[in-house]
Amino acid sequence: MFLGYDCVISISSRKRIADKLEEVNVNKLSFKSIVGIAQYLNPMIRGWVHYYGKFKMYELTKVFRLLSARLVWWARKRYKRYKTSIKRAYRWFFRIQEQFPNLFYHWKMGYAN
């Protein structure tokens, strides 16, 4: 029995967002702190959450996991102490998430990885 279509983000839309993140090249942004990156990315993230997250917000988890990985790579390039250890870089990232839960728009909405 067919009950209708389910509203979720399509695979091609997820790929389009991943391509946009690649185009922005987060890990090569030259901001001095993560606050600058948050101010730069928040309008895009807000748009994705409002457009694609209207029905099933958890479907955006893969996109935000990719964004988190890109932010960790940025930290590894920016700060020498995280260059050699990805574990340390992820610990830094989770500490930032804990200390500033409203820094990125998707963190405000409850998407903490």
Image: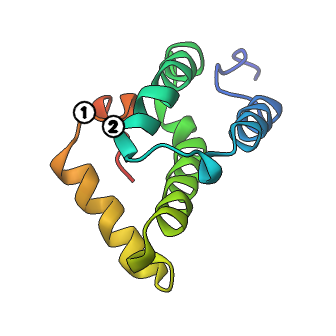
Q: Is residue 42 left or right of residue 8?
A: left
Q: Earlier in the sequence, mark 2 or mark 1?
A: 1
Residues 28 and 23: in front is 28
Confirm or deny contact between disc 2 and disc 1 (CB under 8 A). yes
Residues 91 and 62: in front is 91
Q: Which residue is label 1 attached to?
A: 102
Q: Residue 2, percent across and down?
A: 76, 20
Which residue shows up at 71% across the image and 33% down it?
Answer: 17
What is the C-alpha distance between the residues marked 2 and 1? 6 Å
**Relative to 10, residue 100 above or below:** below
Residues 109 and 101: in front is 101
Which residue shows up at 34% across the image and 38% down it?
Answer: 35
Its colouring scheme is: rainbow
Element assignment for label 2:
helix
Q: Residue 45, percent across and down?
A: 51, 26
**Relative to 102, residue 113 above or below:** below
Q: Nearer the viewer, mark 2 or mark 1?
A: 1
Image quadrant occupied by the C terminus:
bottom left
Q: Residue 98, percent across and down?
A: 19, 52
Q: Is residue 22 left or right of residue 34?
A: right
Image quadrant occupied by the N terminus:
top right
Amino acid type, label 1: Asn
Q: Is residue 78 left or right of residue 23?
A: left
Within-10-Å neighbours for mark 1: few <14, some 14–19, many 20+: some
Amino acid type, label 2: Trp
What count of labels does the image hold?
2
Element assignment for label 1:
loop
Within-10-Å neighbours for mark 2: few <14, some 14–19, many 20+: some
- The numbered mark at residue 107 is 2
**Relative to 42, residue 19 above or below:** below
